Amino acid sequence: MPGFTLVEMAITLVIVGLLLGCMVLPLLTLQEQAVFSETRQKLAEIREVMVGYGMSHGYLPCPAISLSDGAEDRNSSTGICNKRVGFLPWAELGFQKLDGWGHLYRYSVSSNFSNSTTKILLTSNGDITVIARDVNGATSNISNIPAVIVSHGKSAAWAFQDDGSQIADTSATNIDEDINGNNAAGTTFYTKDITKNTTSTGGEFDDLVVWIPSSLYINRMVSAGQLP
């Protein structure tokens, strides 16, 4: 059988290249979905670890001391956190430091739930509000939250990397992500479905946000004997 001509070989390579190109896009999408799923699972595990920490200690941990020190940043004399928002105290919790994209988790905790001297009561309320935005842009508030953990997603606006560098926010439209990543007070966070639509209300969004409901935490504390 005669061999392929150079033209036939070139055409074959082009066809193979097109087929491979068609395969790469779905694979990249699947990879992205896998990382999102992995990080969602990690966040769910962090929430359970945090609740378990509260059940054993009687209070929630403070944010980490620094980018490189994952112990909680607590004043040992007063029992008060030296800051209420910062990085997840990964070493204190015995958990992974980074999310699926290699960035540190942002963490905020209500002061009355983290004070190791004056512990919570059955009537204690968290001072964090999560604003849930639906696909139409409408919002509903989830209040009385003791603690929130955020992964800044693939776009990683405002996120910190393991080497200490912060990823710049290059968008002017991701307003909801700006609140999650650049809110010094740490009392308001947004959550909504992932979208790349820059014209949607609140802008594009791929943050993953979880929180500890006050009712869940109080009930767990009662079952652990930390509350009457």
Image (cartoon, rainbow, N blue to C red):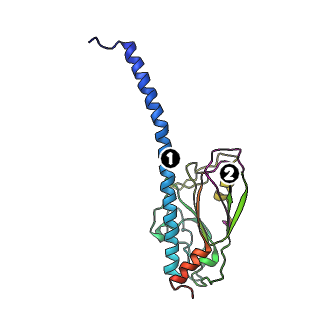
Residue 64: in magenta span: no
Mark 1 closeness class: few <14, some 14–19, many ≥20 residues within 10 Å? some
Residue depicted at 45% across the width and 62% down the height: 96
Tags 2 and 1 touching, CB below 8 Å: no
* Callout 1: SS: helix
Q: Which label was assigned to residue 135?
A: 2
Location of mark 1 (residue): 32
Quick one: which residue is furthest to the left in this view?
1
Residue depicted at 69% across the width and 48% down the height: 203
Query: Mostly what secondary structure, the magenta segment?
Result: loop
Image spot of residue 226 (x, y percent): 54, 85
* Callout 2: SS: loop
Q: CA distance from mark 2 to mark 1?
A: 21 Å
Image spot of residue 180 (x, y percent): 65, 58
Relative to 22, say whether 228 is above or below.
Answer: below
Residue depicted at 61% across the width and 84% down the height: 118
